[in-house]
Image (cartoon, grey):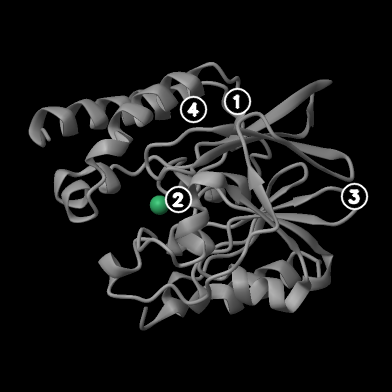
Amino acid sequence: MERPWEGAFEPFRVFGNTFFSGTIPASTHLIDTGSGLIVIDTGYQETLYLMLDSLRKLGFVPGDIRYIVHSHGHIDHAGATKALVELTGAETFIGTGDLDMVTGKRPLSWAPEYDMTFPGVFEPDHLLRDGDRITLGNVTVECVATPGHSPGTFSLFWNAGEKDGRTVRAGMMGGAGLNTMASWYIRKYHLEEEDWRGAFAASLERCRREHVDLFIGNHTGQNRMKEKFFRLQAGDADAFIDENAWGKFLDGCEKDFSALLEKDPL
Ligand SMILES: [Zn+2]
Protein backbone atom coordinates (compact mmCIF):
# COMPACT_ATOMS: atom_id res chain seq x y z
CA MET A 1 0.00 0.00 0.00
CA GLU A 2 1.88 3.02 -1.31
CA ARG A 3 -0.34 5.96 -0.41
CA PRO A 4 -2.42 4.96 2.63
CA TRP A 5 -3.46 8.56 3.41
CA GLU A 6 -5.57 8.61 0.26
CA GLY A 7 -8.03 6.29 2.01
CA ALA A 8 -8.51 8.57 5.04
CA PHE A 9 -12.08 9.24 6.10
CA GLU A 10 -13.65 11.48 8.74
CA PRO A 11 -14.40 9.52 11.93
CA PHE A 12 -17.97 9.75 13.21
CA ARG A 13 -20.55 8.33 15.58
CA VAL A 14 -22.68 5.93 13.53
CA PHE A 15 -25.29 5.63 16.26
CA GLY A 16 -25.28 5.37 20.05
CA ASN A 17 -22.14 3.62 21.29
CA THR A 18 -20.84 2.76 17.81
CA PHE A 19 -18.26 4.81 15.89
CA PHE A 20 -16.53 4.54 12.51
CA SER A 21 -12.76 4.94 12.89
CA GLY A 22 -11.57 3.29 9.70
CA THR A 23 -10.47 4.18 6.21
CA ILE A 24 -12.14 3.64 2.86
CA PRO A 25 -10.12 0.48 2.06
CA ALA A 26 -10.33 -0.94 5.59
CA SER A 27 -13.18 -0.39 8.03
CA THR A 28 -12.59 -0.31 11.74
CA HIS A 29 -15.28 0.42 14.31
CA LEU A 30 -15.23 1.33 17.98
CA ILE A 31 -17.83 0.42 20.57
CA ASP A 32 -17.79 2.59 23.69
CA THR A 33 -18.81 0.23 26.49
CA GLY A 34 -18.57 2.73 29.33
CA SER A 35 -15.61 0.70 30.64
CA GLY A 36 -13.28 0.98 27.68
CA LEU A 37 -13.42 0.42 23.96
CA ILE A 38 -13.99 -2.65 21.85
CA VAL A 39 -12.32 -2.31 18.45
CA ILE A 40 -13.84 -4.32 15.63
CA ASP A 41 -11.12 -4.99 13.04
CA THR A 42 -7.85 -3.07 12.95
CA GLY A 43 -7.26 -2.52 9.22
CA TYR A 44 -3.91 -2.50 7.48
CA GLN A 45 -0.78 -1.75 9.47
CA GLU A 46 -0.13 1.07 6.97
CA THR A 47 -3.41 2.77 7.96
CA LEU A 48 -3.07 2.31 11.72
CA TYR A 49 -1.89 5.91 12.20
CA LEU A 50 -5.08 7.11 10.50
CA MET A 51 -7.19 4.90 12.76
CA LEU A 52 -5.42 6.30 15.84
CA ASP A 53 -5.96 9.87 14.56
CA SER A 54 -9.64 9.04 14.18
CA LEU A 55 -9.86 7.55 17.65
CA ARG A 56 -8.38 10.72 19.18
CA LYS A 57 -10.67 12.96 17.12
CA LEU A 58 -13.59 11.04 18.59
CA GLY A 59 -12.36 11.96 22.07
CA PHE A 60 -10.68 8.69 23.04
CA VAL A 61 -7.08 7.71 23.67
CA PRO A 62 -5.37 4.46 22.59
CA GLY A 63 -5.22 3.31 26.22
CA ASP A 64 -9.04 3.13 26.22
CA ILE A 65 -8.88 0.08 23.95
CA ARG A 66 -9.47 -3.07 25.97
CA TYR A 67 -10.63 -5.65 23.43
CA ILE A 68 -9.91 -6.17 19.73
CA VAL A 69 -12.45 -8.40 17.99
CA HIS A 70 -11.92 -9.57 14.40
CA SER A 71 -14.56 -10.32 11.82
CA HIS A 72 -11.88 -12.48 10.21
CA GLY A 73 -8.12 -12.72 9.81
CA HIS A 74 -7.43 -11.17 6.42
CA ILE A 75 -4.74 -8.50 6.16
CA ASP A 76 -7.28 -5.67 5.72
CA HIS A 77 -8.97 -6.63 9.02
CA ALA A 78 -6.11 -7.88 11.18
CA GLY A 79 -2.99 -6.36 9.61
CA ALA A 80 -2.59 -3.70 12.31
CA THR A 81 -3.47 -5.91 15.27
CA LYS A 82 0.03 -6.79 16.40
CA ALA A 83 1.10 -3.13 16.44
CA LEU A 84 -2.10 -2.06 18.19
CA VAL A 85 -1.63 -4.72 20.87
CA GLU A 86 1.94 -3.57 21.42
CA LEU A 87 0.67 -0.01 21.86
CA THR A 88 -2.34 -0.74 24.08
CA GLY A 89 -2.01 -4.19 25.62
CA ALA A 90 -5.55 -4.95 24.45
CA GLU A 91 -6.82 -8.54 24.41
CA THR A 92 -7.55 -10.07 21.01
CA PHE A 93 -10.41 -12.30 19.84
CA ILE A 94 -10.64 -14.17 16.52
CA GLY A 95 -12.47 -17.16 15.10
CA THR A 96 -10.71 -20.47 15.74
CA GLY A 97 -10.66 -21.21 12.01
CA ASP A 98 -8.50 -18.16 11.27
CA LEU A 99 -5.88 -18.89 13.93
CA ASP A 100 -3.42 -20.37 11.41
CA MET A 101 -3.84 -17.27 9.24
CA VAL A 102 -2.78 -14.72 11.88
CA THR A 103 -0.03 -16.90 13.33
CA GLY A 104 1.45 -17.24 9.85
CA LYS A 105 1.00 -21.01 9.58
CA ARG A 106 -1.24 -20.82 6.50
CA PRO A 107 -0.82 -18.18 3.76
CA LEU A 108 -4.54 -17.41 3.62
CA SER A 109 -4.55 -13.78 4.83
CA TRP A 110 -4.97 -12.50 1.24
CA ALA A 111 -1.62 -10.70 1.69
CA PRO A 112 0.03 -12.64 -1.19
CA GLU A 113 -2.83 -11.67 -3.51
CA TYR A 114 -2.17 -8.00 -2.71
CA ASP A 115 1.58 -8.51 -3.19
CA MET A 116 1.97 -7.77 0.51
CA THR A 117 3.39 -9.61 3.50
CA PHE A 118 1.19 -10.05 6.57
CA PRO A 119 3.00 -7.54 8.74
CA GLY A 120 2.40 -8.78 12.22
CA VAL A 121 1.66 -12.37 13.06
CA PHE A 122 0.23 -12.64 16.56
CA GLU A 123 -1.11 -15.18 19.03
CA PRO A 124 -4.73 -14.31 19.79
CA ASP A 125 -5.75 -14.26 23.45
CA HIS A 126 -9.21 -15.72 22.82
CA LEU A 127 -10.43 -18.09 20.10
CA LEU A 128 -14.08 -17.58 19.25
CA ARG A 129 -16.58 -20.38 18.98
CA ASP A 130 -20.10 -20.13 17.67
CA GLY A 131 -22.40 -18.46 20.18
CA ASP A 132 -19.65 -16.86 22.25
CA ARG A 133 -20.55 -13.59 23.96
CA ILE A 134 -17.97 -10.93 24.67
CA THR A 135 -18.98 -8.58 27.48
CA LEU A 136 -17.21 -5.37 28.44
CA GLY A 137 -18.86 -2.60 30.44
CA ASN A 138 -22.48 -2.28 29.34
CA VAL A 139 -22.05 -4.02 25.97
CA THR A 140 -22.24 -7.67 24.96
CA VAL A 141 -21.11 -8.64 21.47
CA GLU A 142 -22.79 -11.83 20.24
CA CYS A 143 -20.47 -13.84 18.00
CA VAL A 144 -22.00 -16.07 15.34
CA ALA A 145 -19.79 -18.36 13.26
CA THR A 146 -20.41 -17.61 9.58
CA PRO A 147 -17.56 -19.33 7.72
CA GLY A 148 -17.14 -19.23 3.96
CA HIS A 149 -15.20 -16.07 3.16
CA SER A 150 -12.62 -17.57 5.52
CA PRO A 151 -12.87 -20.59 7.84
CA GLY A 152 -12.94 -18.42 10.98
CA THR A 153 -15.28 -15.63 9.84
CA PHE A 154 -17.60 -14.40 12.60
CA SER A 155 -20.61 -12.13 12.31
CA LEU A 156 -21.09 -9.79 15.25
CA PHE A 157 -24.21 -8.34 16.86
CA TRP A 158 -24.63 -5.87 19.72
CA ASN A 159 -27.01 -3.28 21.09
CA ALA A 160 -25.89 0.15 19.90
CA GLY A 161 -28.38 2.27 21.82
CA GLU A 162 -32.05 3.14 21.95
CA LYS A 163 -34.46 4.95 19.70
CA ASP A 164 -38.06 5.75 20.67
CA GLY A 165 -37.69 3.46 23.70
CA ARG A 166 -36.61 0.49 21.60
CA THR A 167 -33.22 -1.17 21.43
CA VAL A 168 -31.25 -0.56 18.25
CA ARG A 169 -29.41 -3.76 17.36
CA ALA A 170 -26.25 -3.45 15.32
CA GLY A 171 -25.03 -6.23 13.06
CA MET A 172 -21.98 -6.90 10.92
CA MET A 173 -21.66 -9.74 8.42
CA GLY A 174 -18.14 -10.99 9.07
CA GLY A 175 -17.16 -11.76 5.50
CA ALA A 176 -19.18 -11.36 2.34
CA GLY A 177 -16.46 -11.31 -0.33
CA LEU A 178 -16.56 -14.13 -2.85
CA ASN A 179 -12.89 -13.67 -3.78
CA THR A 180 -11.77 -16.58 -1.59
CA MET A 181 -14.40 -18.88 -3.10
CA ALA A 182 -13.25 -18.42 -6.71
CA SER A 183 -12.07 -21.66 -8.28
CA TRP A 184 -8.55 -20.34 -8.90
CA TYR A 185 -8.15 -19.51 -5.20
CA ILE A 186 -9.54 -22.84 -4.03
CA ARG A 187 -7.15 -24.68 -6.35
CA LYS A 188 -4.18 -22.47 -5.48
CA TYR A 189 -4.44 -23.35 -1.78
CA HIS A 190 -5.95 -26.84 -2.17
CA LEU A 191 -9.14 -25.98 -0.28
CA GLU A 192 -11.41 -28.36 -2.22
CA GLU A 193 -11.97 -30.60 0.79
CA GLU A 194 -12.95 -27.70 3.05
CA ASP A 195 -16.07 -26.73 1.08
CA TRP A 196 -15.95 -22.99 1.77
CA ARG A 197 -18.79 -22.50 -0.71
CA GLY A 198 -21.10 -24.86 1.16
CA ALA A 199 -20.20 -23.12 4.42
CA PHE A 200 -20.98 -19.72 2.91
CA ALA A 201 -24.43 -20.82 1.73
CA ALA A 202 -25.24 -21.98 5.27
CA SER A 203 -23.82 -18.74 6.73
CA LEU A 204 -26.12 -16.62 4.59
CA GLU A 205 -29.09 -18.59 5.89
CA ARG A 206 -27.82 -18.23 9.44
CA CYS A 207 -27.49 -14.45 9.06
CA ARG A 208 -31.09 -14.18 7.88
CA ARG A 209 -32.22 -15.36 11.31
CA GLU A 210 -30.77 -12.25 12.96
CA HIS A 211 -32.71 -9.02 13.36
CA VAL A 212 -30.57 -5.97 12.60
CA ASP A 213 -31.68 -2.33 12.83
CA LEU A 214 -28.23 -0.85 12.28
CA PHE A 215 -26.29 -2.59 9.53
CA ILE A 216 -22.56 -2.04 9.96
CA GLY A 217 -20.39 -2.95 6.97
CA ASN A 218 -16.93 -4.36 7.40
CA HIS A 219 -16.28 -2.73 4.04
CA THR A 220 -17.73 0.70 3.36
CA GLY A 221 -19.51 -0.34 0.16
CA GLN A 222 -21.64 -2.94 1.94
CA ASN A 223 -23.86 -0.49 3.82
CA ARG A 224 -23.37 2.52 1.50
CA MET A 225 -21.43 4.09 4.34
CA LYS A 226 -20.32 7.29 2.57
CA GLU A 227 -23.82 8.17 1.37
CA LYS A 228 -25.31 7.60 4.83
CA PHE A 229 -22.49 9.57 6.44
CA PHE A 230 -23.38 12.62 4.33
CA ARG A 231 -27.05 12.23 5.33
CA LEU A 232 -25.93 12.09 8.95
CA GLN A 233 -23.86 15.25 8.44
CA ALA A 234 -26.90 16.95 6.94
CA GLY A 235 -28.83 16.36 10.17
CA ASP A 236 -30.47 12.96 9.73
CA ALA A 237 -29.47 11.39 13.07
CA ASP A 238 -31.02 8.05 12.07
CA ALA A 239 -29.33 7.85 8.66
CA PHE A 240 -27.92 4.41 9.43
CA ILE A 241 -31.05 2.94 11.02
CA ASP A 242 -32.95 0.81 8.54
CA GLU A 243 -34.31 -2.58 9.56
CA ASN A 244 -34.53 -3.63 5.90
CA ALA A 245 -30.90 -2.89 5.01
CA TRP A 246 -29.58 -6.17 6.45
CA GLY A 247 -32.01 -8.33 4.47
CA LYS A 248 -31.38 -6.40 1.28
CA PHE A 249 -27.64 -6.82 1.73
CA LEU A 250 -28.05 -10.58 2.23
CA ASP A 251 -30.25 -10.73 -0.89
CA GLY A 252 -27.41 -9.09 -2.84
CA CYS A 253 -24.87 -11.55 -1.41
CA GLU A 254 -27.06 -14.47 -2.37
CA LYS A 255 -27.50 -13.18 -5.91
CA ASP A 256 -23.74 -12.68 -6.36
CA PHE A 257 -23.08 -16.09 -4.84
CA SER A 258 -25.53 -17.81 -7.21
CA ALA A 259 -23.82 -16.08 -10.13
CA LEU A 260 -20.43 -17.37 -8.91
CA LEU A 261 -21.72 -20.95 -8.67
CA GLU A 262 -23.03 -20.71 -12.18
CA LYS A 263 -20.07 -18.98 -13.84
CA ASP A 264 -17.22 -20.55 -11.91
CA PRO A 265 -18.01 -24.19 -11.12
CA LEU A 266 -15.42 -26.28 -9.30
ZN1 LIG B 1 -11.59 -10.77 3.85
Disc 1 and disc 2: Cα gap in Å? Answer: 17 Å
What amino acid type is highlighted by mark number 2?
His
Disc 3 and disc 1: Cα gap in Å? Answer: 22 Å
The residue carrying mark 1 is 212
The answer to which image quadrant residue 209 occupies is: top right
The residue carrying mark 2 is 219
> Which residue is pictured at 61% across the width and 72% down the height?
82
What amino acid type is highlighted by mark number 1?
Val
How far across and down, in percent of the image, does residue 12 sit? 66, 56
The residue carrying mark 4 is 245
Which of disc 2 and disc 1 is earlier in sequence?
1
The image shows residue 99, relative to residue 128, as above or below, that is: below
Disc 4 and disc 3: Cα gap in Å? Answer: 28 Å
Q: Residue furthest bottom?
A: 2
Foreground residue, 184 or 222?
Answer: 184
Which of disc 1 and disc 3 is earlier in sequence?
3
Q: Residues within 10 Å of mark 2 (few under 14, many from 20)?
A: many
Name the mark nearer the viewer: 4 or 3. Answer: 3
Disc 2 and disc 3: Cα gap in Å? Answer: 26 Å
